[in-house]
Amino acid sequence: MGQRVYGHGAGAVVSVLVMWTAFASVFSLMLGYSRVPYAAALDGNYFRTFARVHPVHQFPYVSLLALAGVAALFCFLRLADLIAALVVIRILLQFLVQSVGVIVLRVRRPDMARPFRMWLYPVPALVAAGSFVFILVSRNGFQREIRYAAVILVVGIVVYCARAWRRKEWPFGDSGLALGR
């Protein structure tokens, strides 16, 4: 529409600006998100190879290359399917679990020091959890993405349990992290 009003040159300029903005967004996200596996590896909570930094420029190059590889693989998927799957997986494995986790932590560890307070607790957490469930079930074909999230959750639990068993951490050993204390 804008090309009809302002001409072919303006349309080309706007197209280049949109592509530049998309590239800059992906570039900044990859640079930022590459620090997550890097930091986890430094703490001993992820594969050690991700803790490597470039010898000259001091950035986590293994983590960055791994994220770039995953992003390149995602380019072969349909954009609508990819966005739907990522939204559902993020809602289920991050937002919904956090909403429930706040309530579980408060119930299991009422004596734990908290640096902040949630107004009208537990209403905001329950409203958030209900809203996330509504968003999930109101979509057509949401069951497929929920299966993806379930597979990721199960694989994550298995990997965590294998690591915890090997390190003799909770729930297989006494590391002081048990929620009942």
Image: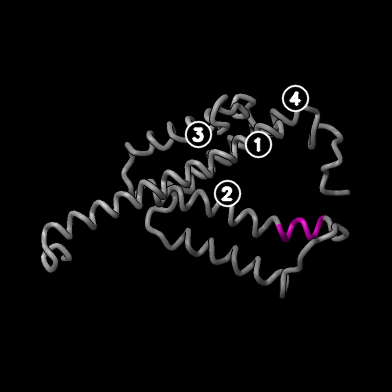
Q: Residue at x 43, y 63 (%)?
A: 138
Residue topped by disc 2? 93
Instruction: Decide if residue 107 is on the left or right side of residue 143.
Output: right
Sequence order check: which comes first, mark 2 or mark 4?
Answer: 2
Q: Determine which residue is flagged by label 1.
A: 40
Name the foreground residue: 101 vs 142: 101
User: What residue sits right under mark 4 in the picture?
Assistant: 166
List the residue tagged with mark 3: 64
Amino acid at circle 3: Leu
Tell which circle, 4 or 3, labels the residue nearer the N-terminal end.
3
Estimate the x, y position of residue 153 in percent, counting from the top left: 58, 41
- Distance from disc 1 to disc 3, alpha carbons, whole Å, reads 14 Å
Q: Amino acid at mark 2?
A: Leu
Residue 161 is tagged as none
Q: Is residue 155 above or below residue 2?
A: above
Query: Which is closer to the viewer, label 2 or label 3?
Result: 3
Is 8 rendered above or below residue 180? below
Residue 104 in the magenta stretch? The answer is yes
The kind of residue on which mark 1 rests is: Ala
